Amino acid sequence: MGPLSFPAREDSKLEYSNPEIPEGINTSKTHPLKEFLWLTGGVMAAIFALVLILILFADVITSYIPFSVEQNITFSGVEASTEEGPLPEYLQSLADRIVRAEDLPEDMKITIHYLDDETVNAFATLGGHIFFFRGLLEKLPNENALAMLMAHEIAHIKHRHPIRSLGRGVIVGLALSVISTAAGDAIIESFLGKTGYLTILKYNRDMESQADETAIQALNSIYGHLGGADELFKILKEEAGRLEPPVFFSTHPLTENRLYEIKIHTEKHPAHDVTDITPLPQEFEKWVEEKEEEKTISL
Amino acid sequence: MIDLGVFLTLLALGYGFGRYAELKHYKSIIQREKELNILPAIAARTPPMISKACDCNLVTGNVVISVDYFKRFISVLRNIVGGRITSYETLIDRARREAILRMKQQAHEMGAKQVFNIKFETASIYKGKRQQVGSVEVLAYGTAIIPSQGG
């Protein structure tokens, strides 16, 4: 196809021309480096101010973080634990009774994990996960002591101690993850650590006392007395004396004081008789041992 | 720390090369605009009144210009605070003027005296995809009026 042709026209007075347009109408005259400095300076100052405010009010803000956010934080360590079998089931059923006694909110789901390890310890962590080590369970003489231990850990969850003790790091991380997911996750991770952060959660003495207080009330409402509960602290005291005091124990209130607390409460709600103390299930000892045997065979 | 180093290096490279290319480009644009000013490009849709018979032909000018790391970083910050994205303004300005110049150059080579009914098409090559270099395409097209050889 060849080019279109137009016939000539009669009147041709119109003249067209393109004027020289001055520079800087469609573009900005600001030097790019100046803009860069203004922008980065301003944005960084804003983030800094935000983080500062978050740090100052961390403790207040943490109590407003919904429990579901905690549940969404994934962490390592859960894989190593057992949730199936008679022992974890028994522990979970006991936990459910305590949850009712402590009157936890509906959405606070407690998950019990059993770790086949000699460590004499138990701890509560983010997302309502509570870990029990074989080392501590096999030392417990009766259900009341176990219930005291469990009630104490569940009370930690109830009072939101795990997230409150992580406090600032997590708050700042969660806030920054709104701006940049990568930066936020990196901060949370650096505070939590990639592995083994579960056990480094430290609760201060006020938190421990609060948990003890709630646990004592729960035990009272379940059993009607505190008989046998003091056994737990006697074991912990023995452990603390035998080993060099681990971090876990040093942040707890002095065991003497805790025993004294229980004594005072026991005087208020006395156990009628030693026979009132609920024994552990008959197979409990077997459960705790059986696991050990299975483990040695598998090794 | 390494990430920060890489980031700052990219930023410095982006600024250095981007700025150099932009200043050089503007210099060339301004000079060629003066040269091709003899050939007006008009937005009017109908051909102007011409006494002599003439041929009309489609002329196009097309250009693709890439954004640099520095410009993109500034635009990201602008996404937070708002305002004129001046770093992109120069990019688009250069692309449009370059496209017109290429169109006019084509018309000039055909022996045209004017180009009328000029239009633009602007396209973002990367369409907002992440992890891709952003670049803009500008196509300018119009109808060149070439005086008929036969008269």
Image (tube, coloured by chain):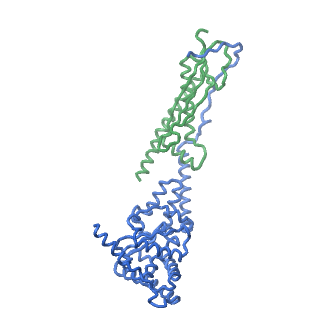
Colour chosen for chain A: blue
Q: Position of residue A252 (x, y in %)?
A: 44, 77
Horizontal side, residue B48 vs residue A48: left or right: right
Q: Nearer the viewer, residue A295 or A212?
A: A295
Q: For the point 47% across and 74% down, which residue is it?
A: A95
Residue A2 in sight from this viewpoint: yes
Q: Position of residue A77 (x, y in %)?
A: 40, 65
Q: Nearer the viewer, residue B21 or A31?
A: B21
Res A236 quadrant in image = bottom left
Q: Position of residue B96 (x, y in %)?
A: 57, 31
- Look at the picture and state if A76 lies above or below A263: above
Q: For the point 49% across and 73% down, which residue is it?
A: A96
- Look at the picture and state if B90 lies above or below B106: below
User: Which chain is represented by green in the image?
Assistant: B
- Look at the picture and state if B101 lies above or below A130: above
Screen quadrant of the N terminus of chain A:
top right
Screen quadrant of the C terminus of chain A:
bottom left
Horizontal side, residue B40 vs residue A33: left or right: right
Q: Nearer the viewer, residue A164 or A86?
A: A86
